[in-house]
Image (cartoon, rainbow, N blue to C red):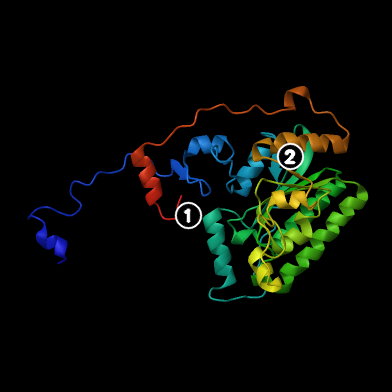
Amino acid sequence: MSWIDKILPSGVSKGEGKKRSSVPEGLWKKCVKCDAVLYRPDLERNSDVCPKCDHHMRIGARRRLDSFLDKGDREEIFTDVVPVDRLKFKDKKRYRDRLAGAQKSTGEKDALIAMQGTLKGMPVVVVAFEFNFHGGSMGYAVGEKFTRAAQLALENRMPLVCFAASGGARMQEALISLMQMAKTSAVLERMKLAGVPYISVMTDPIYGGVSASLALLGDINVAEPDARAGFAGPNIIEQTIRQKLPKGFQRSEFLLEHGAIDMIVHRTEMRDTLGRLLAKLGNVEIAPELAADPVPAFELLEPEPEQEVQVERKPEGDE
């Protein structure tokens, strides 16, 4: 018997009188940058961009594609490409078990989703990385699906758009994953020689082999605000060169200032901006009714003190 059981009057339990929360789970979310507690429906209407500090939160690949492509005119492609544990790799855990766990938690087969559809009425092939699947790392299936999507775009002379968010090559696939770098960069070179546009959109974060082999190889390289992009991370670079890096190093604003990318585009303006770019590259006109998406109008709902406390008490990373 614990000490608290000894001092409680008989017939009184520790949980008696405890109120159940009337706040639905997941209704509020805390911004990791400014600590504002945000009403989730408001946040989703604003494309998961904090309306108070403009921080771009991570969103899933499927949701990103759904908000980018025209409604109803889309098809997921190359769903038959799935990861295979050819090396029977095992570290602390078998690779096949890691894959099964990632597939269960994300609902995706691997870290890349490819779709064919239209943007502002223009045919386009779009791929997006799912960072929650093994950190968006590139193994055989990711490299193969990207290559097939690029080949489809090349054969049909449709633009290719890639939303990249990745930690790099997938270490559990060793040389197989590294070979995807050569494969993806080769197909992008064929697209370049054929004059088929490829726009790369870098979202936070994008590092390693994925940044080198496809994310920084666009005809136009775009990034979301404050996104981190590079080959090696800043900590590794500082340890190697034994120097302190400049403030904001590898952030999209730093990359734009030093000519590594072409433009920074706010997430809520991505459809309109990329639509204008593709129309210009393809020498086509966008129908007036499709030229600009309506801006959602809403008033920010402020949390009650009790709701704010509940969000603050949640473990970090808990939704």
Q: Which sits earlier in the primary sequence, circle 2 or circle 1?
A: 2
Distance (Cα) linking label 2 and label 1: 34 Å
Quick check: 205 left or right of 278?
Answer: left
Which percent across, then down, holds residue 286? 80, 28
Give yes or no for contact between labels 2 and 1 (Cβ–Cβ under 8 Å). no
Q: Residue at 77%, 68% (x, y): give it.
A: 179
Q: Quadrant of the N terminus?
A: bottom left
- The disc placed on residue 233 is none
SS for dot 2: strand
User: What is the three-letter code of the residue carrying label 2?
Assistant: Gly
The quarter holding residue 23 reads: top left
Residue position marked by numbered label 2 in the rendering: 117
Which percent across, then down, holds residue 116? 74, 43
Q: Residue at 79%, 38% (x, y): give it.
A: 123
Residue 187, compared with residue 226, is above or below; it is below
User: What is the three-letter code of the residue carrying label 1?
Assistant: Gly
* Observer-nearest of 312 and 158: 312
Which percent across, then down, holds residue 302? 43, 34
Residue 83, compared with residue 58, is above or below; it is below
**Residue 146 in view here:** yes
Residue position marked by numbered label 1 in the rendering: 317
